[in-house]
Image (spheres, rainbow, N blue to C red):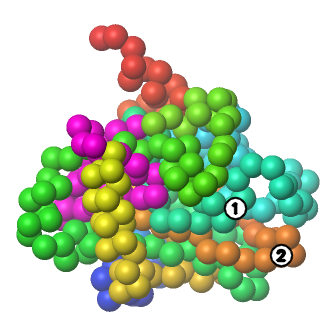
Amino acid sequence: MQINQLHPLFMGEIIGLDTRTPLALEAIDCVEQVMAEYAVCVIRDAVLDDDNLIAFARSFGPMELAPPGSKRIAEGLYDISNLTADGEIRPYNPDGPQPVDFERFHTDSPFNSLPTKWSFLLAHVTPPSGADTEFIDTRAVYDDLPQEMKSRIEGLEVDHDMFRALKRTGVEFENEEMRKNFPRMTHPLVRTSSNGRKALYLGWHAIDIVGWEEEDALELLDHLFEFATQNKYIYAHKWRPGDMVIWDNRCTMHSATAFERYKYKRDLRRATINESGPEVSAIEANRKASEPV
C-alpha cells in the first residue's frame, strides 16, 4: 500500500488496498498503523456492498449496532443519505430539526457508553457540488493549547447531550423515543489516542463539565470548540463515488457541509465499531452499563 498525506497535520489517502477480498492479517495491521498515524484515511474506489462494508468494518473491531428507530439501512449500517426507502429524495419536512441543525463539528456516538473506535463512511451517490465532510484532528489541537490550558483541563469529565445542545441553538426537539436512543453520556475531555498522543474529546454535543457551574463550563467548552475549529485544523473531503473514509472518533471531529439536498441525491452508508465489548446497540449497552453489579 502507498499512503499520501492530504493535509499538513493529518489525513491519509490509502492507495493499493484491495477491498474485494477479505483482508489478510498483514493488511489489517497495516491499516491499524496508518490510522494511528493519520487519524482519518480515505480508500479510493472501494468495492463494497452493504454486507461487505459490515464485514470490512468487523475486521477492526466489534460493530456498534444501530439502535431500533434510528436512521439505519441494516442493524449494522447507519443511513447517511437524503433518500427515502425507495431511493427518491426525501421531501422537505417543516416539523422538527432541519439538517442544518446537525451540520456542526462532532464525534460519532458520544451517547454510547461503549468506547467508540472508528467510523467507515462509504459513498455510493454524491451530488455535483457541496456535501463535503470536514475533519479535525484534535490531537493537533491539543498539541497547540498553551500548557496552562492543558493543565486546567486534565482530568475533566464532560457531559454530551444532543437535546440540550440543540436547545442552546434555539431548536426545541423533545422526542422521548429518540432520547432513549441517544441519552446523555459523560466522557473524559482529554483522551490518549492509539499512538500515545493526547487529544480533545469534544463536539457540539458537549454541554457541561461534571462538578462545574453551567456558565463556567459552557464558557470553557465554547472556547475550546472555537479554538479547535480554526481553518488551519480543517481538512474538507470532497466526495466521489467509491470513496470510503475511515476516521478515529477518539481523536477527531467531523461535520457535514450543505448542498442542494432537495435537488440532488446523496447516498452514503456508515458502519461504526467499538474498541471492545459485545456487538449491541447503544440502547442495550447503556442498559447493561446501568445495571447493578
Above or below: residue 268 compared with residue 146: above
Task: Inspect the image, locate mark 1, and give the three-letter code of the amino acid beneath it.
Answer: Pro
Q: Position of residue 141 (x, y in %)?
A: 27, 73
Which one is in front, 189 or 64? Answer: 189
Above or below: residue 207 compared with residue 223: above
Q: Position of residue 230 (x, y in %)?
A: 37, 81
Q: Which mark is residue 182?
A: none
Range shown magenta: 185-213
Residue 193, magenta (yes or no): yes
Q: Position of residue 10 (x, y in %)?
A: 34, 79
Which one is in front, 66 or 41? Answer: 66
Count neighbours of disc 2 (C-alpha within 10 A) and say few if under 14, some if 14 to 19, many if 20 or more.
Answer: some
Task: Inspect the image, locate mark 2, and give the three-letter code of the amino acid beneath it.
Answer: Tyr
Give me the residue at 30% from left, 66% from top: 224
Q: Which mark is residue 99?
A: 1
What element does badge 1 sit on? Answer: helix
Residue beneath label 2, please?
264
Which one is in front, 173 or 4? Answer: 173
Q: Is residue 189 left or right of residue 131?
A: left
Position of the C terminus, as image quadrant, is top left
Quarter of the image where one finds residue 25: bottom left
On the question of residue 63 being in view, the answer is: no
Residue 169, magenta (yes or no): no
Q: Is residue 118 left or right of residue 125?
A: left
What element does badge 2 sit on? Answer: loop
Between the C-alphas of marks 1 and 2, the distance is 15 Å
